[in-house]
């Protein structure tokens, strides 16, 4: 999915600010877009006075990049009243970009200044961004860490718990009993979203269901755990299984912090799995993977919903497929708005007088589009043998 123009330009500003002069060709390679696109972005940013451009080079407009800059506090003094709210989200994460826009709307309506920081995919990328924002005088923090693995999530608990400005986690719910258990958070109730998907299929008469899900985010891990719990507890469900939705749906290749993690990187043959389990329905997370899997099923002669019913988890592009997919829709923009409103509530009150910690959950909805129906009497068709 194409990255929003505004976020791409924020990333350009962040790179130029941190490195000084940067070639347009280097920026294009790092952002994985064309040189023409970056040149156009640099021209617009230069026109707005946010950087300077030379022959094939982008340079900082000043010692500190304007968007992320706030008045720096002197040693021992509080940040200036006009200090920004630091907003930290991962790069190339369409799910959380909708959350970002919800938060931005609420903050802008309040007149609060925003310092947007885009975290790279490198492990631990959020910490230096947060530390830099705080050093520049940020008054509060809204953050959605990437947390691709449980290990990387645990690694962030300690330093995040020590942030000394009001902080709200967006679309993240830390482990119970962890150092962040008592941190304000606003997220989707993914257990309920998973329940909606399973209940819809069971109500249609499906008794054998497969979950093909990612495993590289807190949302993915919660969906996998919820599906196992819900399917096991439903007497109507005769058989269920959980598999990876795609080979890249995992935290990454084993490294020092993932040495104990083992994942099968073989592409999923969903049609074969459905036949093996006698399954008539599948819940697929996320919706981009879902569209690709449905396309692959069609190539193997399995038609949705006639031969297999499908519910996608997430609703960014689920409606755009050749077969529009019934989908669970987490309230992403509303999550961002609620998180921003909670942070504004904290900032408006004296330190220690804002009441108890709040852990807010918003319920997803189910968008029914017809990719699920009553199971057919026949089994999933087998592939036609290739001709010699």
Image: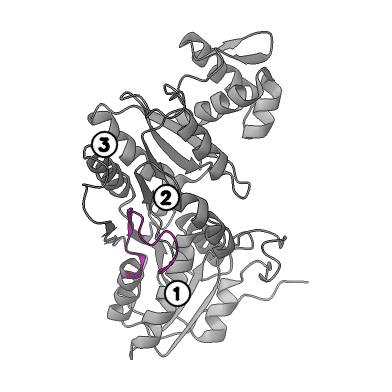
Q: Residue at x 51, y 26 (%)?
A: 9
Q: Nearer the viewer, residue 104 or 244?
A: 104
Do the numbered discs 2 and 3 sit on residues whose CB atoms are within 8 Å? no
Task: Name which of mark 2 and mark 3 comes first in the sequence.
Answer: 3
Task: Give the numbered dot on residue 225.
Answer: 1
Q: In the image, residue 94 lies at what x, y percent?
A: 46, 45
10 Å neighbourhood of mark 3: few (<14), some, or many (≥20)?
A: some
Q: Real-space Cα distance between discs 2 and 3?
A: 25 Å
Q: Nearer the viewer, residue 240 or 221?
A: 221
Going by the image, does 193 lie left or right of 250? left
Q: Real-space Cα distance between discs 3 and 1?
A: 32 Å
Question: In the rendered image of this protein, does residue 322 appear above or below residue 387?
Answer: above
Q: In the image, residue 210 lies at what x, y percent?
A: 47, 77
Q: In what element is the residue under mark 2?
A: loop
Which residue matches tag 2? 317
Q: In the image, residue 314 lies at what x, y percent?
A: 40, 57
Task: Name which of mark 1 and mark 2 comes first in the sequence.
Answer: 1
Q: Nearer the viewer, mark 2 or mark 3?
A: 3
Q: Which residues are magenta?
A: 176-191
10 Å neighbourhood of mark 2: few (<14), some, or many (≥20)?
A: some
Which residue matches tag 3? 106
Question: In the rendered image of this protein, does residue 378 appear above or below residue 134?
Answer: below
Q: Is residue 297 magenta?
A: no
Q: Is residue 186 magenta?
A: yes
Characterize the magenta stretch by its predominant secondary structure.
Answer: loop
Q: Is residue 136 visible?
A: yes
Do the numbered discs 1 and 2 sit on residues whose CB atoms are within 8 Å? no
Q: Real-space Cα distance between discs 1 and 2?
A: 24 Å
Q: Residue at x 59, y 78 (%)?
A: 272
């Amino acid at each position: 999915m194409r990255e929003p123009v505004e976020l791409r330009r924020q990333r350009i500003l962040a790179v130029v600010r941190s490195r000084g002069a940067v070639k347009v060709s280097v920026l294009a390679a790092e952002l994985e877009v064309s040189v023409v696109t970056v040149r156009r972005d640099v021209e617009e940013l230069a026109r707005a006075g946010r950087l300077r451009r030379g022959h094939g080079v982008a340079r900082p407009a000043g010692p500190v990049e304007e968007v992320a800059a706030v008045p720096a506090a002197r040693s021992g003094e509080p940040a200036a009243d006009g200090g920004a709210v630091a907003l930290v989200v991962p790069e190339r994460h369409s799910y959380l970009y909708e959350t970002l826009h919800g938060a931005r709307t609420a903050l802008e309506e309040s007149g609060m200044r925003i310092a947007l920081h885009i975290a790279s995919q490198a492990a631990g990328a959020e910490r230096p961004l947060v530390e830099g924002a705080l050093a520049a005088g940020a008054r509060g923090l809204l953050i959605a860490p990437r947390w691709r693995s449980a290990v990387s999530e645990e690694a962030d608990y300690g330093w995040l718990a020590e942030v000394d400005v009001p902080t709200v986690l967006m679309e993240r719910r830390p482990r119970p009993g962890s150092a962040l258990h008592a941190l304000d958070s606003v997220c989707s109730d993914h257990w309920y979203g998973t329940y909606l998907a399973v209940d819809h299929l069971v109500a249609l008469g499906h008794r054998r269901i497969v979950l093909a899900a990612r495993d590289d985010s807190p949302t993915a891990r919660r969906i996998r755990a919820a599906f196992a719990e819900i399917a096991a507890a439903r007497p109507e469900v005769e058989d269920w299984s959980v598999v990876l939705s795609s080979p890249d749906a995992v935290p990454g290749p084993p490294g020092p912090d993932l040495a104990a993690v083992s994942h099968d990187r073989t592409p999923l043959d969903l049609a074969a799995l459905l036949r093996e389990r006698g399954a008539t329905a599948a819940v697929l997370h996320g919706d981009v993977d879902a569209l690709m899997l449905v396309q692959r099923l069609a190539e193997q002669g399995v038609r949705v919903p006639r031969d297999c019913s499908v519910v996608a988890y997430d609703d960014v592009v689920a409606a755009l497929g050749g077969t529009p997919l019934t989908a669970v829709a987490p309230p992403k923009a509303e999550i961002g708005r609620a998180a921003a409103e909670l942070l504004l509530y904290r900032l408006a009150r004296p330190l220690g007088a804002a009441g108890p910690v709040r852990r807010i959950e918003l319920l997803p909805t189910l968008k029914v589009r017809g990719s699920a129906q009553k199971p057919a009497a026949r089994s999933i068709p087998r592939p036609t043998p290739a001709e010699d």
